[in-house]
Amino acid sequence: LRPIESGHIRLCGREITNRSPAEAIWAGLGYIPEDRLQVGTIPVFSVAENLILKDHLRPPLSRRGFLDMQVVSRFAHQMVQEFDIKTPSVETNVRSLSGGNIQKLVLAREIQRKPALLLAVQPTRGLDVGATEYIRHRLLEQRQQGRAILLISEDLDEILALSDRIAVIYEGQIMGILSAREAKRQQVGLLMAGMPA
């Protein structure tokens, strides 16, 4: 969202430096934001509407600029079932759901698009143990399918459980890049505090 002052961002060979969020999405970027209620969803929209936010203009959900509500409903029911989203109905407003179910909805919307890169920012913050384990399991599934995931987290357990490589940033500088297999908790903690490990 901030203009890039130097360097380039390329995703699958496509230049997305200083492009709009929509262009990054079309290039293959998936995004699980830290604030699932205000940034990840539109709380007054229904579960179904939130599930199609990024694809509402694409067939088969839309034809000639008009939503096919039967297709939207079938798609939403399929996502609710596949991602175990607990909701009274696909027409329920998202603000009525628990945090864990909102996060499952965001995850479902992003994963079903099969992004080339999934950017996950604090994906389990504020979730109960069950929802945390579910989200982590689904992210690991994506990794096993070859999906690139950039995880941004302050939770050391999460970082060590989900990462292949760990880059520690302190005050805008990369302090070190470690293999997750070899990284020690204390070593990562020192880097997080700006100290050489």
Image (cartoon, rainbow, N blue to C red):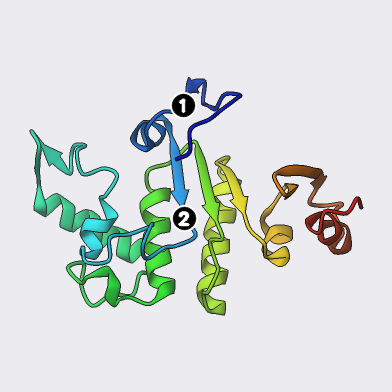
* Tag 2 residue: 33
Circle number at residue 16: 1
Q: Residue at x 63, y 58 (%)?
A: 153
Q: Position of residue 94 (x, y in %)?
A: 28, 69
Q: Please give left or right for residue 6 compared with residue 109 in the image.
A: right
Hey, which residue is sitting farthest right in the picture?
197
The kind of residue tagged 2 is Pro
Circle number at residue 101: none
Q: Residues within 10 Å of mark 2 (few under 14, many from 20)?
A: many
User: In the picture, residue 146 is in which quadrant?
Assistant: top right
In the structure shown, which secondary structural element does the residue marked by tag 1 occupy?
loop
Q: Earlier in the sequence, mark 2 or mark 1?
A: 1
Q: Position of residue 45 (x, y in %)?
A: 21, 63
**Where is 147 relative to 129, above or below?**
above
User: In the picture, residue 125 is in which quadrant?
Assistant: bottom right
Q: Please give left or right for residue 100 compared with residue 130 in the image.
A: left
User: In the picture, residue 108 is in which quadrant?
Assistant: bottom left
Q: Residue at x 91, y 50 (%)?
A: 196
Q: Nearer the viewer, residue 107 or 9?
A: 9
Q: Please give left or right for residue 191 compared with residue 171 in the image.
A: right
Q: Residue at x 69, y 52 (%)?
A: 163
Q: Position of residue 144 (x, y in %)?
A: 60, 47
Q: Nearer the viewer, residue 154 or 128?
A: 154
In the structure shown, which secondary structural element does the residue marked by tag 2 occupy?
loop
Q: Residues within 10 Å of mark 1 (few under 14, many from 20)?
A: some
Q: Position of residue 68 (x, y in %)?
A: 9, 47
Q: Residue at x 9, y 36 (%)?
A: 65
Q: Please give left or right for residue 1 compared with residue 38 in the image.
A: right
The kind of residue tagged 1 is Ile
Quadrant of image for the N terminus: top left
**Where is 134 relative to 61, above or below?**
below
